Structure formats: C-alpha cells, structure tokens
Image (cartoon, grey):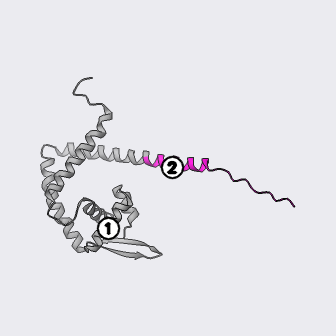
Amino acid sequence: MSKNKTPAWRLGIHLDISNRLWQEAMNKNITYTKINRPHWLALGAIDELGANCNMTQICDYLQCEVSTCSRALAFLEKNQLITKTIMEGDKRAKGVTITEEGKHLLEELDIHAEASRKQLLLDVSPEQLATFKYVVEKIKERALHIIQQDSDSAEETEEVEKPLKKKKHHSL
C-alpha cells in the first residue's frame, strides 16, 4: 500500500482530529465570552430552529445528550440569553426562544469565529468547500440512517424477545 493512499477506515480518525483542532482554533478566538462551547452550540441551535423549539428538537439537531443540553439551557436561561415558556396543549413541555441579548451574543461570537474560519479555510477554494460540505452532509445523513436502523432493529428485537405471558386458566 502506498503512503499517499489512506485506507477508508482511517477517515474517521482524520475527521475526529480535524474536528478537535477546528474546535480548539474556534475556542482560541471566543475565550473572551461568558459561555462555553455547549452553551453557544445550544444558543445557535435555538436561533436556527426558531421560537418555541423544545429540548428534544435541540438535542436531535445537535446530536447531543439530554443532560448536556439541559445544563446548557439552564445556564442560558439564568443569563437571560433564552426564555422558556410553557407550551399550549401540554403543560409539561417548554418552548425555548432566544432573547435579543442572546442574538447579540451569537452575532458577536460569529464575528470572532469568522476570523478563525477565514484562517482555517485560507487555502480552500469555494468549489472545494462546497464539495466538502456536500460530503460531510452525506456522511451525516448516512450515519443518522444507520443509527436509526440500529435503533429500529433494537426495538424490534426487544419486542420479539419479550417472553410470552401464559394466560392463566381458571378451573371451575
């Protein structure tokens, strides 16, 4: 095998390393803020999903754990970057909406992140970036499809493996 040809199985390693390095570069330019990465990811998701989105939608959008999202939302609410409202029809469900202060902070974050993005993508043409975005989106779609298949299979297996309860026959 030549050194220039990377086996497909190493793609995940390179994606993981690139992602962590991207995050570090971004964190370097946004350290001045009072929020951390899970906070600004949740804030961005809320802004993109729109007013009265719920925690399930945010977790699905970010592909994150409920506990991480819950802590981030609590912090964002405490700092008046979001508001929570009880949803009509289901008093247990809460809608989440970004506040004007949250939008302003997100704009500031984006300005600082843009400086990092420009540096990181300096030698990447618009065509290469478009291809990269396409490939990453396809990987994400296929991964979600595989995860959903596994989830559906697990549910089917659980149903099949449930022991059948014998009906009790009463003698008269």
Secondary structure beneath disc 2? helix
Q: Quick one: quadrant of the C terminus? A: bottom right
Q: Nearer the viewer, mark 1 or mark 2?
A: 1
Q: Position of residue 154 (x, y in %)?
A: 52, 48
Please give left or right for residue 61 compared with residue 88 in the image: left
Residue 158 is a magenta residue? yes
Residue 131 in view: no
- Measuring 45% from the left and 73% from the top, which residue is drawn there? 92
Q: Nearer the viewer, residue 160 or 100?
A: 160
* Residue that lies at the very extreme toward the right in this rendered image: 172
Task: Tell me which residue sits at (27%, 23%) in the image.
Answer: 1
37 part of magenta stretch: no
Q: Which quadrant of the structure image shows residue 68? A: bottom left
Question: Looking at the rendering, which quadrant does residue 40 occupy?
Answer: bottom left
Question: Where does the magenta region start and end?
Answer: 147-172
SS for dot 1? helix
Instruction: Tell me where residue 15 sits by quadrant.
Output: top left
- Mark yes or no: residue 122 visible: yes
Residue at image mark 1: 73
Q: Position of residue 160 (x, y in %)?
A: 61, 47
**Local crowd at mark 2 within 10 Å, few (<14), some, or many (≥20)?**
few
Q: CA distance from mark 1 to mark 2?
A: 29 Å
* Vertical side of 107 occupied by 19: above or below: above
Query: Which amino acid type corresponds to the residue marked 1 in the rendered image?
Result: Leu
Which dot marks residue 152?
2
* Circles 1 and 2 in contact, beta carbons < 8 Å: no
Identify the amino acid type marked 2.
Asp
Residue 50 placement (x, y as % from top left):
32, 67
Q: Residue at x 62, y 50 (%)?
A: 162
